[in-house]
């Protein structure tokens, strides 16, 4: 079949896989290939056992697979053939050298740029899909356009706003698609090519065009704003616990103000995920490097409150269980950083599990989708942790339950049955305010939640 254009995506992860599957589904006239250095990942994308759990993803992949969607490890050949190259490789926080613990590690990114350069013999559009520090496009242009073969590369920024667990819904009906380019004639032409792809299913008014720097910065800013809301509500949850105000009532009351809005005001044990912390720290690092110390400190406090919230959760468990949990079995229900994903990157459950193990508790971890990843996260303390997919078995004989992920299935468990199988006094620490606390209290539990006074029998 003659395709209109050949699209390549480098990086077949949580972003590259679902995003390209959606483009392929909606644009059968484009050939879409996704490549990765990870052979197993590529094999899994070609199977019924996808490398990531994401509701609704499998049918999307299956419909387009081998029609106009292909997964491959042949990176060089596919670069050569592509007209438009999305780069969706990971950009984790740097763990070494200057900026360690703050700046984005751009080694995978730069390697990709050089690989594109080495394997291209025609002009190409290169699209930043990964989240990157502002002005990365300039470095990218410098590397790519350093060639003396007369090949021109246009670098666009098209950050991805999907959230895990709702990726397919977000990709199918995005609030907006953001496309930034240089405001030169070839830049605008390249931008239009990308607009044309998304316009196959996204209404024009939802496709925002901007200069390339605004697009790069908007991504970091969006994540910083979202995380800031969670830290804001979480900071006030602590005040509620001291004052008999109820954080859920406060969130509802303020969220009904249309200027504030009701989203991202759910109090929790803390935000997790591969993006929020990494992107805020990157923003902080960038601000510091421009000498904007006050701005940097302001955003850094969002991360600090989050860390404090996680710490507070562990302390609450310890203090309320008579200051010792050594030798006590504690069932952790939920290890994913949010519901409907198996992803555990930066999950608050990691910190909590480690904190409990440090206090010598016997920790049992249960999760419907994240046990494999949980084992990897806790590789160094796996001797002190057990894993049990069935929440009833996980809770059996335990002194306490900690709810760390808001999986819907935890709402409908038979808590009377669980209570009966536990040591007494039985404790429940609801890190997501997911359950009916009054009902649990009536069953006999001592109930501790986020931002509300405890319901105790002791
Ligand atoms: P990921 O780790 O799941 O996937 C990245 C993939 O890139 C991996 O499979 C890795 O093997 C591959 N890769 C690395 N170097 C490569 C190379 N040189 N050639 C080919 N493949 C290579 O990461 P992700 O979660 O998909 O995130 C990718 C980017 O998107 C990051 O910048 C992230 O900040 C951003 N982002 C992520 C999300 C999210 O929800 N996960 C949402 C929006 C944006
Ligand atoms: C986030 C952004 O939402 C998305 O736009 C971006 O592309 C990637 O980063 P993600 O991390 O997948 O997405 O999930 P998100 O729904 O934002 O949740 C992040 C964390 O915040 C989770 O741990 C979640 O449980 C927590 N959270 C979210 C709260 O604690 N309270 C809330 O009200 C909302």
Image (cartoon, grey):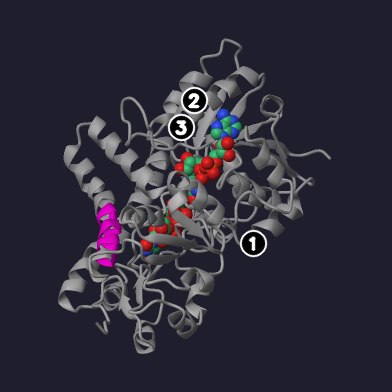
Neighbour tally class for label 1: few under 14, some 14-19, many 20 plus, Cα within 10 Å: few
Q: Tell me, for residue 56, which label it has, or none.
A: 1
Q: Is residue 307 within the magenta segment?
A: yes
- The reply, left or right, for residue 117 in relation to residue 180 is right
Q: Return the x and y of residue 448 as percentages of the image width and height.
A: 30, 74
Residue pointed to by mark 3: 182
Among the two numbered marks 2 and 3 on one chain, the one whose residue lies closer to the N terminus: 2
* Image position, residue 94 (x, y; %): 38, 32
Question: Marks 3 and 1, how far apart in space?
Answer: 35 Å
- Residue 75, image quadrant: top right
Task: Indicate the quadrant containing the C terminus: top left, top right, bottom left or bottom right.
Answer: bottom left
In the depicted structure, whether residue 362 falls above or below residue 135: below
- Residue placed farthest to the right in the image? 1
Q: Is residue 48 magenta?
A: no
Q: Which mark is residue 110?
A: 2
Q: Do residues under tags 3 and 1 come within 8 Å of each other at their CB atoms? A: no
Question: What secondary structure is found at the residue carrying circle 2?
Answer: helix
Say whether disc 3 or disc 1 marks the residue closer to the N-terminus. Answer: 1
How many labels, in total? 3
Can residue 37 be seen here? The reply is yes
In this rendering, position of residue 359 left or right of residue 436 = left
> Which of the 4 quarters of the picture holds residue 237?
bottom left
Residue pictured at 49% horizontal, 25% vertical: 110
Residue at 43% over, 81% down: 419
Magenta range is: 306-317
* Residue 179 visible to an observer of this rendering: no
């Amino acid at each position: 079949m003659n395709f209109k254009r050949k699209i390549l995506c480098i990086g077949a992860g949580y972003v590259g896989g679902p995003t390209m599957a959606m483009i392929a589904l909606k644009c059968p006239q484009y050939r879409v290939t996704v490549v990765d250095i990870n052979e197993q990942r590529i094999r899994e994308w070609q199977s019924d056992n996808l490398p990531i759990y994401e509701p609704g993803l499998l049918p999307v992949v299956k419909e387009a697979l081998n029609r106009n969607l292909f997964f491959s490890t042949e990176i060089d050949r596919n670069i050569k053939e592509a007209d438009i190259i999305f780069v969706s490789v990971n950009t984790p926080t740097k763990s070494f050298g200057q900026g360690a613990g703050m700046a984005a590690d751009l080694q995978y990114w730069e390697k990709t740029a050089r690989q594109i350069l080495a394997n291209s013999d025609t002009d190409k559009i290169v699209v930043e899909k990964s989240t990157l520090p502002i002005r990365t496009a300039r470095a990218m242009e410098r590397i790519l356009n350093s060639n003396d073969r007369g090949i021109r590369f246009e670098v666009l920024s098209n950050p991805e706003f999907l959230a895990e667990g709702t990726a397919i819904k977000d990709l199918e009906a995005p609030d907006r698609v953001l496309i930034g380019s240089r405001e030169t004639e070839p830049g605008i032409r390249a931008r239009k090519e990308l607009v044309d792809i998304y316009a196959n299913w996204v209404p024009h008014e939802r496709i925002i065009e901007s200069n390339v720097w605004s697009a790069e910065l908007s991504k970091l800013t969006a994540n910083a704003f979202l995380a800031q809301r969670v830290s804001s509500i979480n900071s006030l949850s602590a005040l509620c616990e001291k004052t008999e105000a109820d954080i859920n009532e406060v969130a509802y009351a303020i969220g009904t103000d249309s200027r504030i809005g009701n989203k991202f005001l759910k109090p929790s044990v803390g935000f997790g995920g591969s993006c929020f912390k990494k992107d805020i720290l990157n923003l902080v690092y960038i601000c510091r490097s421009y000498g904007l110390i006050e701005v940097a400190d302001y955003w850094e406090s969002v991360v600090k409150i989050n860390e404090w919230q996680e710490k507070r959760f562990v302390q609450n468990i310890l203090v309320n269980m008579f200051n010792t949990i050594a030798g006590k079995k504690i069932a952790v229900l939920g290890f994913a950083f949010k519901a409907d994903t198996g992803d555990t990157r930066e999950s608050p459950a990691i910190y909590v599990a480690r904190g409990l193990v440090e206090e010598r508790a016997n920790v049992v971890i249960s999760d419907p989708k994240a046990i494999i990843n949980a084992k990897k996260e806790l590789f160094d303390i796996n001797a002190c942790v057990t894993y049990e997919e069935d929440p009833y078995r996980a809770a059996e004989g335990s002194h306490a339950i900690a709810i760390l992920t808001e999986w819907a299935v935890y709402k409908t468990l038979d808590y009377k049955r669980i209570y009966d199988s536990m040591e007494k006094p039985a404790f429940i620490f609801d890190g997501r305010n997911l359950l009916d606390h009054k009902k649990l209290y009536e069953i006999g539990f001592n109930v501790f939640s986020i931002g509300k006074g405890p319901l105790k029998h002791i």
